[in-house]
Amino acid sequence: MASRPINSTSPRGVSRRAALGLVGALVSATLLAVPQANAAAPGLDDPAKKEVAMKLVSSAENSSLDWKAQYKYIEDIGDGRGYTAGIIGFCSGTGDMLDLVRLYTQRKPGNRLAKYLPALEDVNGTDSHAGLDPKFTKDWATAAKDSAFQEAQRDERDRVYFNPAVAQAKADGLRALGQFAYYDAIVMHGDGTDPTTFSNIRKRAFKKAKPPAQGGDETAYLHAFLDARVWAMQQEEAHSDTSRVDTAQRVFLNNGNLDLNTPLDWQVYGDSFHIG
């Protein structure tokens, strides 16, 4: 599963809301200033394209294309983020799991995870299980059968990761592949001021190439972005395997598949996948 920074400057840490506010402001300002990406081709927010995106992320996060089977997923993968769970890898140590359970509880008071809110607040920013063990994992899996909890997972995924990534990519003039590259990056790295978070990966790419919205070549820019992404992954042992870029996104880019059209064939961590 993905692992994101838990330092105080990352949205996957205790100040995620503040960092996302900056991202939202940047996206809004950029959207006013530049034309949108290739309106004729479906973007990643097209339902069919979004389904492809969910499968691509799941192949890396769960070694499976069945992303809908991951609502119940939960384990500590030993990356310093505590428990990692759900369809996008919400983490007990990075704030987004706390926000998810808060949303679920707002919508359905008295749910079986509500009692863990104080513990989730206490362990935020750490890898501790204090107040969660021994029944949290079982209660999570049981809650995952509830359609209200599934909907909350999807809504938080979209609010925190998918929508900001796609909006920024469109503002940069990128088509579906570039939109997915941004989404996958923000899922793994979160956002904030840390050098390896999404905004700074993007800034690092800007030093090598300009995006289409600034008059640059889309393919050249995406290579620069993926290079910057690989650099960021290599800064942490948990991300040292860069195959989700090298033998997946880079393959699509080298094939000129900027609209992320199917069929798609790729590998992640040595496993082969296909979408027909």
Image (tube, rainbow, N blue to C red):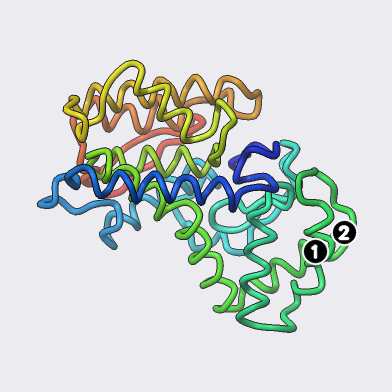
Could you tell me which quadrant the N terminus lies in? Answer: top right
Task: Specify whether 45 is left or right of 72.
Answer: left
Badge count = 2
In the picture of the structure, the residue carrying the numbered disc 2 is 133
Judging depth in this view, the residue of 176 and 35 nearest the camera is 35
Q: Residue at x 51, y 44 (%)?
A: 187
Q: Which residue is drawn at 14% across and 45% down?
A: 38
Mark number, residue 151:
none
* Mark 2–mark 1 CB contact (< 8 Å): yes
Label 1: how many Cα within 10 Å (few below 14, some 14–19, many 20+) = some
Task: Specify whether 210 is left or right of 105.
Answer: left
Task: Specify whether 88 is left or right of 276.
Answer: right
In the picture of the structure, the residue carrying the numbered disc 1 is 136
Task: Specify whether 127 is left or right of 57.
Answer: right
Residue 87, horizontal then vertical, whole percent: 54, 57
Judging depth in this view, the residue of 137 and 80 nearest the camera is 80
Residue 261, horizontal then vertical, whole percent: 21, 45
Label 2: how many Cα within 10 Å (few below 14, some 14–19, many 20+) = few
Q: Is mark 1 on a helix, strand or loop?
A: helix
- Separation of disc 2 and disc 1 at Cα? 6 Å
Inspect the image, locate mark 1, and give the three-letter code of the amino acid beneath it: Phe
